[in-house]
Image (cartoon, helix red, strand yellow):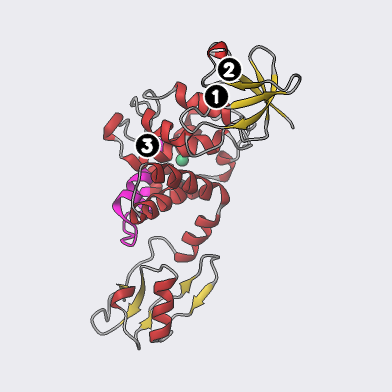
Amino acid sequence: MRFLSVDQLVPGTRLARPLYGAEGLILLRENFELTDSIICRLRGMGYHGVYVNDEISEGIIINDVVDEKLRIETANRLEDINVGILSVGIGVKLEYNRDKLIQLGMSGMLHDIGKKFVPTDILDKSGKLSKSEFQVIQTHPERGYEMLYKAYNLSSVTKIGVLQHHERFDGSGYPNGLKGHEISMFGRIIAVSDTYDAMTSDRAYHKASQPSEVIEYLFGNGNQRYDLRVVDYFSKCIAVYPVGSCVELSDGTKGIVLKNYSDSVLRPVIRNIQNKQIIDLKNDVNYLGICISGQMQS
Ligand SMILES: [Fe+2]
């Protein structure tokens, strides 16, 4: 068995493993004989390659490091997809090319795969974790990396992102306490998108925070726990105060968001609900000392 890129496939080649679609369902069964038109369709669907049996690879057995179906099921877990999507959003702002964006997206989606080795009673515990329980949780980046290490269809940067997503810019993270640029860009990016996703979601141990609160937290920890440049790019990917949402200013004024600035996401243009006055929080000098203090239910 060996892995062949789609460009190397020829009609008559037989699949060594089932081929799964995006939904985790089998598209082509093991031992399926490829035809010209199927190869062409695989290329069109974006497959990089498939496992095949041929003379050259006879007798070669590839042990599953990550079962293909498990990989797809993992990819389908919404929270992990969120982190993948948010990470890719940052990658787009950083002008990564398509291949690098795919590598980054995979890293974001697989970042917590090592949690499958952590007992669920620890993962789902609503109370404070004991020191020993926290130490078990902290093994998940390395366990995930070890699991993916021999998956040669994943790039090394993808795996490194998994290993380093809990490293922190100031060296306070784990597993290796790396600092600043010792941490790969993928690790720094996933750290930000994972934190945002975790803090804006209801979890067993905390209620969801508002996007604006989390952005302020991330900026507040810029170049401490997080790479400020990554936080800045990230803030441009999301609508902290979506147009049409209701906000309250620190002077008590209530307004509706009319327009966002991508370079100043916490200071949009709003319309005062009471007197219809337009307030440009970014450019109006009269409002330099005023900020948005909270969001209201519309
Ligand atoms: Fe994690």
In magenta, the rendered stretch is 145-166
Residue 149: x and y, percent?
Answer: 32, 54
- Mark 3, secondary structure of its residue: helix
Residue drawn at point x = 51 percent, y = 31 percent = 261
Q: Earlier in the sequence, mark 2 or mark 1?
A: 1
Query: For mark 1, what is the residue?
Result: 267
Image-quadrant location for residue 138: top left
| Residue 89 magenta-highlighted | no
- Indicate the position of residue 119 as horizontal and vertical percent values: 53, 45
Q: Residues within 10 Å of mark 3 (few under 14, many from 20)?
A: many
Left or right: where 264 falls relative to 170: right
Is the CB atom of the residue marked by disc 2 within 8 angstroms of ligand 1's nearest atom? no
Q: Is residue 169 left or right of residue 72?
A: left
Image quadrant for the C terminus? top right
Marks 2 and 3, the one that precedes in the sequence: 3
Of 53 and 93, the residue lying toward us: 93
Q: Is residue 84 left or right of residue 250?
A: left
The residue that mark 2 highlights is 291
Q: Is residue 189 above or below residue 75?
A: above
Look at 42% across and 75% down and name the residue there.
42
Mark number displayed over residue 200: none
Which amino acid does the dot numbered 2 rest on?
Cys
Residue drawn at (64%, 26%) of the image:
270
Density class for disc 2 (Cα within 10 Å; few <14, some 14-19, many ≥20) is some
Q: Earlier in the sequence, mark 1 or mark 3?
A: 3
- Vertical placement of residue 35 versus 260, above or below: below
Disc marking residue 188:
3
Whether label 2 touches label 1, CB < 8 Å: yes
The CA span between labels 2 and 1 is 7 Å
Give x and y (percent) for residue 92.
40, 46
